[in-house]
Image (cartoon, grey):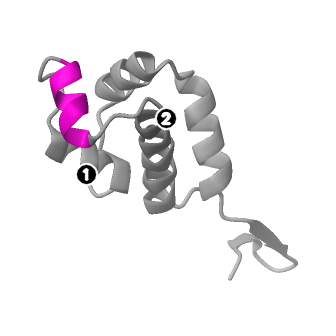
């Protein structure tokens, strides 16, 4: 089971790291991308406050030189909620 809020935040944190590793502010990224992404949208995606469409995520990951599959796999690991088996009902979410 995935905690979707944690998943979005994990993806966003990776995108922020990639941008910062290139020495780019949100405003500078907007300029460098030719206005493709606004500073407001980038910041919202990085914080996990706003949903990021798959197409935009793939485009942004490519722009940063990230492996989109690896980013998603790592976010999935970070956002996984352990499941516990119970004798009576099978599987339940861990507390």
What residue lies at 58% left-to-right and 46% top-to-bottom?
Answer: 75
Residue 49 percent location from the top left of the image: 28, 58
Q: Nearer the viewer, residue 58 or 90?
A: 58
Q: Is residue 93 visible?
A: yes
Residue 44's label in the rendered image is 1
What residue lies at 18% left-to-right and 38% top-to-bottom?
Answer: 27
Secondary structure under badge 1? helix
Q: Where is the C terminus found, in terms of image quarters?
A: bottom right
Side of 41 where 82 appears, left or right: right
Please tell me in which quadrant of the rendered image residue 39 appears: top left
Residue 90 percent location from the top left of the image: 78, 69
Residue 23 percent location from the top left of the image: 40, 34
- Residue with the most extreme front position: 23
> Circle 2 sits on which residue?
21
Nearer mark to the viewer, of 1 and 2: 2
Q: How many other residues sit within 10 Å of disc 1, few (<14), some (14-19) or many (≥20)? A: some
Principal SS element in the magenta part? helix
What residue lies at 50% left-to-right and 18% top-to-bottom?
Answer: 65
Give the extent of the magenta segment: 26-33
Of callouts 1 and 2, which one flags the residue occurring earlier in the amino acid sequence? 2
Q: Is residue 46 above or below residue 59?
A: below
Q: Are marks 1 and 2 in contact (CB under 8 Å)?
A: no
Side of 88 where 67 appears, left or right: left
Secondary structure under badge 2? helix
Side of 6 where 50 appears, left or right: left
């Amino acid at each position: 089971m995935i905690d979707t809020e944690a998943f979005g935040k994990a993806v966003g944190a990776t995108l922020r790291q990639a941008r910062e590793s290139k020495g780019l502010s949100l405003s500078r990224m907007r300029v460098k991308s030719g206005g493709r992404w606004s500073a407001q949208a980038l910041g919202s995606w990085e914080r996990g406050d706003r949903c990021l469409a798959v197409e935009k995520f793939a485009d942004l990951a490519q722009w940063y030189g990230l492996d989109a599959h690896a980013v998603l796999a790592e976010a999935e690991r970070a956002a996984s909620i352990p499941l516990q088996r119970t004798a009576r009902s099978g599987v339940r979410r861990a507390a």
